[in-house]
Amino acid sequence: MIDMSDNTGVGIDNSIIEIIVNGEPYRIAEDSSVIDLVNQLKLAADRLAIELNLTILPRAAWEETKLKADDRLEIVHFVGGGCCPLFISQSLDRVQARSSNRRI
């Protein structure tokens, strides 16, 4: 499980929920929106497509859509010059490596 205590908005005083991002468990503050997640993962929002609970989520709804425990997200990052999506597992690995020695 990824410990997100080093990310802005997640710490001792906040309630934490667990969501699933690209098949992996991910911990985040319970009042987080989809755009908060994108920012925590340090992803370029202009090159993403996001599916929330089997429904494509329009970019205009990212800021207002609050994440709930057990939500399932698939995040696809499009690379320039092609049509082929790249999943963000490398981003999740980087977050996990940064936070593996920290506790909430």
Image (cartoon, grey):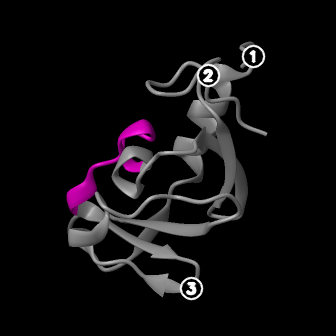
- Highlighted magenta segment, given as a residue range: 38-46
What type is the residue that disc 3 sits on? Leu
What type is the residue that disc 2 sits on? Ser
Looking at the picture, tell me which residue is in the foreground, 16 or 48. 16
Extreme residue toward the bottom, this view = 55
Which residue is disc 3 drawn over?
54
Which mark, residue 58? none
Which residue is disc 2 drawn over?
5
Lower sequence index among marks 3 and 2: 2
* Above or below, comparing residue 88 to residue 62 in the picture: above
Q: Are marks 3 and 1 in contact (CB under 8 Å)?
A: no
* Above or below, comparing residue 69 to residue 16 in the picture: below
What type is the residue that disc 1 sits on? Arg
What's the residue at 26%, 62% (across, down)?
Answer: 47
Q: Is residue 35 magenta?
A: no
Question: Could you tell me how far apart the alpha carbons at marks 3 and 1 are, in whole angstroms?
Answer: 31 Å
Looking at the picture, tell me which residue is in the foreground, 12 or 35. 12
**x then y, percent, for residue 21:** 61, 59
Which residue is disc 1 drawn over?
103
Lower sequence index among marks 1 and 2: 2
The number of callouts visible is 3
Mark 3: give few (<14), some (14-19) or many (20+) Cα within 10 Å.
Answer: few
* Above or below, comparing residue 68 to residue 101 in the picture: below
**Is residue 46 left or right of 29 when viewed as pictured?**
left
**x then y, percent, for residue 42:** 37, 38
What's the residue at 45%, 41% (across, down)?
Answer: 41
SS for dot 3:
loop
Mark 1: give few (<14), some (14-19) or many (20+) Cα within 10 Å.
Answer: few
Which quadrant holds residue 62? Answer: bottom left
What's the residue at 61%, 29% (across, down)?
Answer: 4
Q: Are marks 1 and 2 in contact (CB under 8 Å)?
A: yes
